[in-house]
Image (cartoon, rainbow, N blue to C red):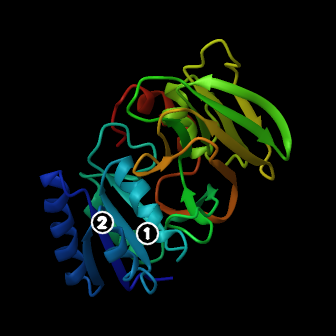
Amino acid sequence: MAVKKVGILYHPMIEAAYTLAKELERFLNSSGVSVWLCSAWEEEKARVQVDDTDLVLTTGGDGTILRAAQVALLAQTPITGINLGKLGFMTELSTDEAVDRLPALLAGGGWIDERATLEAELPPNDQEHESARIFYALNDVVVARGAIARVVYVEASIDGELLTTYKADGVIVATATGSTGYSLAAGGPILHPQAKEFLLLPILPHLSSAYTVVLPSMAVVKLRISTPHQAILSIDGHINLPLSSGDIVTIKRSSNRARFLRIHPETSFYSSLEQRLKGKQIK
């Protein structure tokens, strides 16, 4: 299906990202495509424009992609990322090839790469929220200590069965997509992007379980935090909420899948993995 309307989300603190976004806007307008432009940091502003959008382009890095996923997920709008960052695990095009490859995408070329996401639920509290709060993560959900450098206790249960209580800086629940992010830095394994399983692992555990658990797609994880200090719930690293002792976060695989429009071959994950891990941009 030909693309008729495109949204462009750019990294607002990288001048080159905005410059490229404007260049793409001009190119798309000259091709007869309707375009809207927005900072990736203005998610609410972008979200009201995305419903009838055929494709979202991002100019930035993987962080910009994560913000775009929050905008596009419920509308199921596909995303194509143009990499101005260092790693670009989720981006598809380099800046050099962006304009050359766009006509094929606009004409309906490419293929859809669907990625599993997580759904995290915080129960209502008496002070501010009367109903449960739901958040979606493409990469990971993290329950961790706040600014005070003290470990927290996180009781982890899976499908109602107690697994362990971590004494650590925190706990990560990561998707296959997120397995090459914070989870990898914390010692977790790499999953293929299409894997339905997700990961549960601690951050710097102290005299407690240090292994990673690979969970089936239908598992439900509950994390109950115990700490005399404030802790945080972090969604994809950019939605950060305070947690109090006794708070329980419920995490499961979401029925919503993030969609990416790709032009490179599906087999390129393995061939480019080592280069990406070494911080090299992929042409």
Tell me which amino acid carries mark 1.
Val
> Dot 1 lies on which element?
helix
Tell me the distance, in whole angstroms, between the alpha carbons under discs 2 and 1.
10 Å
Identify the residue under disc 1. Answer: 71
State the residue in front, 254 or 234.
234
Q: Position of residue 97 (x, y in %)?
A: 29, 54
Q: Report the mark closest to the observer, 2 or 1.
A: 1
State the residue in front, 79 or 188.
188
Proximity of marks 2 and 1: CB atoms separated by less than 8 Å:
yes
What crowding class fits label 1: few (fewer than 14 Cα within 10 Å), some (14-19), or many (20 or more)?
many
Q: How many marks?
A: 2
Tell me which amino acid carries mark 2.
Leu
Numbered tag placed on residue 9 in the rendering: 2
Residue 112 in view: no
Give me the residue at 17% from left, 51% from top: 14
Which of the 4 image quadrants contains residue 146?
A: top left
Give me the residue at 21% from left, 65% from top: 21
Q: Position of residue 182 (x, y in %)?
A: 49, 34
Q: Position of residue 46 (x, y in %)?
A: 34, 75
Which of the 4 image quadrants contains residue 163?
A: top right
